[in-house]
Image (cartoon, rainbow, N blue to C red):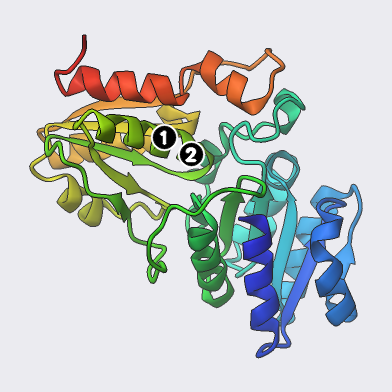
Amino acid sequence: MRNTFINTILEACKERDDIFILSGDAGLGVFDRFKEEYPDRFRNMGAAEQNTVSFAAGLAMTGYKVIVYNIIPFLLYRCYEQVRNDICCQGLPVVLVGIGSGITYAPQGMSHYSVEDLGLVQTLPDLVAISPIDPCEARAAASYALDCHKPVYVRLAKNGEPLFHQHEVTNIAAPQIIRNGEHADTAILFHGSVANEVMAAYETLKDRSRAPLVVSVPTLQPFDVPAIAGILSGFKNVVSVEEHYSNCGLGGMLARLKAETCADWQLTSMGIPYGYIHDVRKTAGLRASLGIATEYIVRSVEAVSGFAS
């Protein structure tokens, strides 16, 4: 996803001379081509994250479309005051590109995990938040962010994610139906870096003739309540899956939607258990220990659908 996102920006530079990239001393190899082709529109700001965000705000006020790239905790958590005051409060169209969503930076430890960023985003009105699942959604997110007149936060996993979409995404702001299920009573909604676990679960359930509807929700702020409520109308069970605290992520948003619309479906939220992660493992092992690996998703869908053994 990361390379697709940056390559989309590079393509846009052929038509635009206002794009400026700031790196917080991260992903430097990713920008080799950009630095070669546009040396006057790239700066590595070093380990000075708060200053980088304020610098981006200043550049944006002079007319540049600024993209700030860093690992999520050093982009959003360390710089919360600057993101809030300098960018969001002034409505500047800066693009914040956060790498390492969820626990994709395992086993670097808690300092590099991003399991609460969407909770933080919800305290920042008008900050658009996009959590793509694959290169197709990452490309659409980059195009959307480049043209958006509001601040945008794009949370990406890392690189090497497989392609799950079967067609190009034309509207990243809308929920995306990834697979139509055979079992009409149950839907899985998810976002971001846990996509490979969800899709593996779908394949297992499909082999058992229990495949649910599978929907990616890439844009989590603003949350498209009418579109999601429409998709889920008539379903009995909704399972949300995310590599994030579910109480302040997609699970929490769906709980509010259910309450506000008096929806009939039952919600099961799967996410990172609310607490600090002290285990140090690889991503797959950590997902398993936190209960969001493929086998747990299969088990949850079968349980709510009445297929539990």
Q: Residues under labels 2 and 1: Cα distance?
A: 6 Å
Is residue 274 toward the left or the right of residue 8 in the image?
left
**Up/down of 301 relative to 197, above or below:** above
**Up/down of 66 relative to 180, above or below:** below
Q: Nearer the viewer, residue 8 or 167?
A: 167
Give the residue at x 58% y 55%: 154
Q: Are marks 2 and 1 in contact (CB under 8 Å)?
A: yes
**Quadrant showing the C terminus:** top left
For residue 196, which numbered disc appears in the image? 2
Counting the numbered discs, the total is 2
Check the image and name the residue furthest to the front: 207
User: Circle 2: is it few (<14), some (14-19), or many (20+) Cα within 10 Å?
Assistant: some
Give the residue at x 41% y 20%: 295
Is residue 1 toward the left or the right of residue 38 in the image?
left
Q: Nearer the viewer, residue 280 or 267?
A: 280
Is residue 127 toward the left or the right of residue 217 in the image?
right
Q: Position of residue 176 (x, y in %)?
A: 33, 56
**Quadrant showing the N terminus:** bottom right
Three-letter code for the amino acid on which mark 1 is drawn: Ala
User: On the image, which quarter does residue 232 sit in?
Assistant: top left
Q: Secondary structure at mark 2?
A: helix
Q: Position of residue 139 (x, y in %)?
A: 54, 66
| Residue carrying label 1 | 200
